[in-house]
Image (cartoon, rainbow, N blue to C red):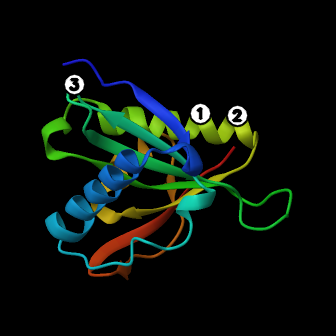
């Protein structure tokens, strides 16, 4: 099955339907499927560049958000997160495509900056395939073991 195309949207360019569907996808995956009642609405979506993949019906089935550096330091890292893939699209390469596109977005906008992510522990090997290395001890994030990971550039 070919990987679905990924569109890049700043928050203000998202349609109401796209925003609703991407928030619904994140809720289904992170809150319901993973039983993690975390505060998804964290104030960072308006400043993020959102990556969305839709299926043939127009439904959002994959998403991620790319975040600018925190602060003005010239070596402040960038990040991406809230990467979610609908169960119907898992094992199709969509997750890998979302990571690759996120890394491309960040490299274009902030070349040479490290990328840091908070990753679910079970995905350490997946992100390691992109060059990420563990950068913290295991910690609990709303009931799910996580680690910080860093891609040095």
Q: Quadrant of the C terminus?
A: top right
- At 59% from the left and 33% from the top, the residue drawn is 104
| C-alpha separation, residue under disc 2 versus residue under disc 3 | 29 Å
User: Where residue 129 appears, x then y in whole percent?
Assistant: 41, 40
Judge from the rendering whether residue 45 lies leftward or rightward of residue 60; answer left or right.
Answer: right
Spot the residue most to the front: 16
Labels 1 & 2 near each other (Cβ < 8 A)? yes
Q: Mark 1 to mark 3: distance in Å? A: 25 Å
Dot 1 or dot 3, earlier in sequence: 3
Q: Quadrant of the image for the N terminus?
A: top left
- Give how far across and how far down residue 41 sits, in percent: 44, 72
Location of residue 91 with respect to 81 vertically, above or below: above
User: Count the marks: how many?
Assistant: 3
Residue beneath disc 3: 56
Query: On the picture, is 39 further left or further right than 116?
Result: left
Q: Circle 1 — which element?
A: helix
Q: Categorize mark 1 by other alpha carbons within 10 Å: few (<14), some (14-19), many (20+).
A: few
Picture coordinates of residue 117, whole percent (x, y): 51, 59
**Mark 2 packing: few (<14 Cα in 10 Å), some, or many (20+)?**
few
Q: Residue placed farthest to the top in the image?
A: 2
Q: Which residue is mark 1?
A: 104
């Amino acid at each position: 099955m070919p990987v679905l195309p990924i569109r890049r949207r700043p928050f203000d360019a998202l349609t109401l339907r796209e925003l609703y569907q991407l928030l619904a996808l994140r809720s289904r995956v992170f809150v319901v499927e993973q039983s993690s009642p975390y505060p998804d609405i964290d104030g960072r979506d308006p400043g993020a560049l959102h990556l969305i993949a839709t299926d043939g019906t127009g439904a959002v089935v994959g998403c991620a958000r790319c975040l600018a550096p925190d602060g003005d330091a010239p070596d402040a890292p960038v990040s991406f997160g809230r990467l979610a893939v609908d169960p119907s699209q898992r094992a199709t390469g969509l997750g890998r495509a979302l990571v690759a596109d996120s890394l491309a977005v960040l490299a274009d906008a902030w070349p040479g900056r490290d990328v840091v992510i908070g990753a679910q522990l079970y995905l350490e090997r997946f992100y390691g395939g992109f060059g990420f290395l563990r950068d913290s001890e295991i910690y609990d994030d709303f009931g799910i073991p996580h680690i910080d990971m860093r891609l040095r550039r």
